[in-house]
Image (cartoon, rainbow, N blue to C red):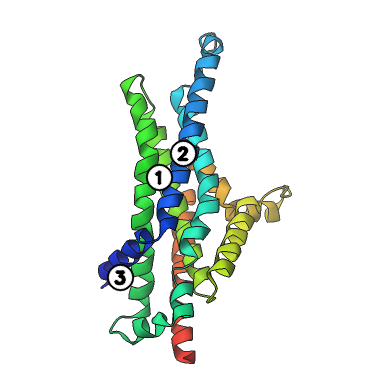
């Protein structure tokens, strides 16, 4: 049943021009960033040849591409997740969904998987650009895979947060703004953090602190556990919110 809901959700996304527009615009922006980074790399080649342990293509082209991608996702994901549940509530179809023989867990996971299927196309689009560099140079496979892992974990976290915010309201616009506000807060929460215990807490909560570490190729269990806890927390809150909504209606 989860897979059926996921396919239904993914199909409904592509019936809207929003999904196609987002994919096209994001691809154009990231392609421009990709070629700009390649130009910068060629401009720096003379200096790099004189440096010991000079950074390579992976550090100077692919890592900045992943950094820009994470920022683009911060803006795009709220637009894609805003209708996940809020539209169902506004149109009244949530009642039909809740009256069907499926649990709230299956509904939430189905919608979550459906949105992740959409963003899998996004990941494939992004991967084609750095992978194309294999035709002309060698890449650091470890850092490349770490970058893809970071983007995947960010998407999974953003979608989980957006799904929860969407379950709180029947207004998709409000859901989009609230999701963006929440993600932005978690993105910059460690800005100007003090160098004490509270600063360490803010650093741990910050999304960018964990994603940037993985993009640099430093993959440790602390960052992975953070994203897993983030995802499961918001999915759990979404299930609880739908259970509460069903009892009230």
SS at circle 2 = helix
> Measured along the vertical axis of the image, is residue 234 above or below residue 189?
below
Which disc, if any, is residue 28? 2
Residue 9 sits in quarter: bottom left
Along the viewing direction, whichever of 86 and 127 lies nearer the viewer: 86
In space, the residues marked 1 and 3 are separated at their CA atoms by 26 Å
In space, the residues marked 3 and 2 are separated at their CA atoms by 31 Å
Which residue is the site of mark 3? 5
**Mark 1 or mark 3, which is nearer to you?**
3
> Measured along the vertical axis of the image, is residue 235 above or below residue 152?
below
In space, the residues marked 2 and 1 are separated at their CA atoms by 22 Å
Along the viewing direction, whichever of 63 and 219 lies nearer the viewer: 63
Is residue 149 found left or right of 226 in the rendered image? left
Residue 216 picture location, percent across and down: 50, 35
> Measured along the vertical axis of the image, is residue 44 above or below residue 180?
above
Q: Which residue appears at 45% of the width and 57% of the height? A: 18
Nearer the N terminus, badge 2 or badge 1? 2
Give yes or no for contact between labels 1 and 3 (Cβ–Cβ under 8 Å).
no
Nearer the N terminus, badge 1 or badge 3? 3
**Mark 2 or mark 1, which is nearer to you?**
2
Nearer the N terminus, badge 3 or badge 2? 3
Which disc, if any, is residue 149? 1
Q: Tally the marks.
A: 3
Which disc, if any, is residue 47? none
């Amino acid at each position: 049943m989860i897979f059926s809901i996921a396919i239904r959700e993914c199909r409904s996304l592509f019936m809207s021009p929003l999904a196609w527009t987002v994919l096209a615009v994001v691809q154009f922006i990231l392609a421009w960033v990709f070629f700009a980074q390649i130009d910068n790399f060629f401009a720096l080649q003379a200096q790099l040849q004189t440096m010991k342990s000079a950074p390579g293509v992976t550090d100077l082209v692919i890592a900045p591409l992943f950094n820009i991608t994470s920022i683009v996702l911060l803006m795009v994901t709220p637009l894609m997740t805003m209708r996940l549940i809020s539209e169902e509530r506004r149109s009244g179809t949530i009642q039909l969904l809740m009256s069907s023989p499926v649990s709230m867990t299956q509904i939430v996971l189905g919608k979550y998987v459906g949105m992740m299927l959409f963003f899998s196309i996004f990941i494939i689009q992004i991967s084609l650009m750095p992978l194309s560099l294999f035709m002309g140079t060698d890449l650091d496979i470890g850092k490349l895979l770490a970058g893809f892992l970071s983007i995947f974990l960010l998407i999974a976290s953003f979608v989980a947060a957006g799904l929860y915010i969407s379950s709180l309201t029947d207004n998709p616009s409000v859901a989009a703004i609230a999701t963006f506000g929440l993600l932005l807060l978690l993105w910059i929460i460690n800005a100007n953090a003090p160098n004490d215990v509270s600063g360490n807490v803010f650093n741990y909560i910050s999304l960018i602190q964990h994603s940037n570490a993985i993009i640099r190729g430093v993959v440790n269990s602390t960052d992975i556990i953070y994203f897993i806890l983030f995802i499961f927390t918001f999915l759990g809150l979404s299930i609880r919110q739908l259970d509460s909504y069903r009892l009230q209606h």
